[in-house]
Image (spheres, rainbow, N blue to C red):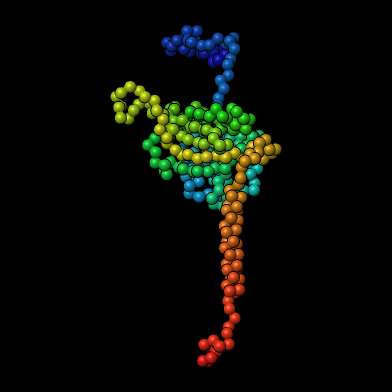
Amino acid sequence: MATVLKAQKKNQSKLDAKGKRKADDMDVDDAEGPSKKRLKNKQRVLLLSSRGVTHRMRHLMNDLEALLPHVKKDSKLDSKNHLNLLPELADLNNCNNCLYFEARRHEDLYMWAAKTPNGPSIKMHVQNIHTMDELKMTGNCLKGSRGILCFDKNFDNSEWGRLTKEVFTHIFGVPPNARKAKPFIDHILSFSILDGKIWFRNYQIVEKDPLQPNGPPQMSLVEIGPRFVLTPIRIFEGAFGGATVYSNPEFISPTQVRSALKREKGAKYGQRKHAEEERHIREARRKLEEDELAVPKVFA
């Protein structure tokens, strides 16, 4: 403000000639007062996926892009083995957060939530995906509006929960000065922990009852979508790598679940074949020897 005051006093003669107010009469802060720097929330998120995503996974990404106006979407990453390129891509796009969806076998989806370039990063398994088009809920919200983040109290009961809450606050919290953000708050993003999983829901804030539009205001929530469940796998110290900060001991990969089901089916098939062999052996033991006076031999 001191530089502004000097500039106004320098042009004081010009302002008096034009009949405008003097600089002393204007409401200008004192130059000797302490200057307070206003903290700005400059969070930008890079959103991209790997090759091999299905239509449901792609629709989920489109829904998240519509919910978060500070997201910048990028093209698909060709290689799944070079995740160290993601911090560089985020830096090129002026983003300090990254959401990376990794598809495996065209049926398993993993989500990486990372702070770039120094970390941490969280790897999660995405299950029970339901997009906005599938749910067809009655709720609706303005595109580009900011949402209120609501976290379950169970996030504060563990260290990995507090770390996940902080990362999700940076990624899903829309800054007020985002380029595509609108100055409205009309929905709530809910994160809940149940059975060791993170459940995501999106609700609209309804201030009036639609059946009584002229009645008193009644606050209620109506679900919009999408909805999905996240199972934390590992938390790394760096961005997409580094030392393991947390590992979920209860997580079982879907590949192991499918192999167990195949082994169970294979065991049933082996039991059926073994019973068939035993039946053939019993039939062979019960078979009588052919008699010499049998009708086929007598009238041959």
Residue 267's place in the image compared with 246, above or below, is: below
* Image x and y of residue 62, in percent: 47, 42
Residue 1 in sight here: yes
Question: Would you say 86 lies left or right of 179 here?
Answer: right
Residue 141 in sight here: no
Rendering quarter of residue 100: top right
Quadrant for the N terminus in the image = top right
* Image x and y of residue 152, in percent: 53, 29
Question: Would you say 108 lies left or right of 240 here?
Answer: left
Residue drawn at x 59%, y 50% as measured from the top left: 257
Residue drawn at x 54%, y 86% as measured from the top left: 294
Residue drawn at x 42%, y 36% as measured from the top left: 224
**Which of these two is toward me, 9 or 253?**
253
Looking at this rendering, what residue extends furthest in the right direction? 243
Looking at this rendering, what residue extends furthest in the front direction? 293
Residue 259's place in the image compared with 49, above or below, is: below
**Which of these two is toward me, 269 or 200?**
269
* Image x and y of residue 145, in percent: 44, 31
Residue 53's place in the image compared with 154, above or below, is: below
Looking at this rendering, what residue extends furthest in the top direction? 24
**Which of these two is toward me, 44 or 114?**
114
* Image x and y of residue 157, in percent: 60, 28
Question: Would you say 14 lies left or right of 266 here?
Answer: left
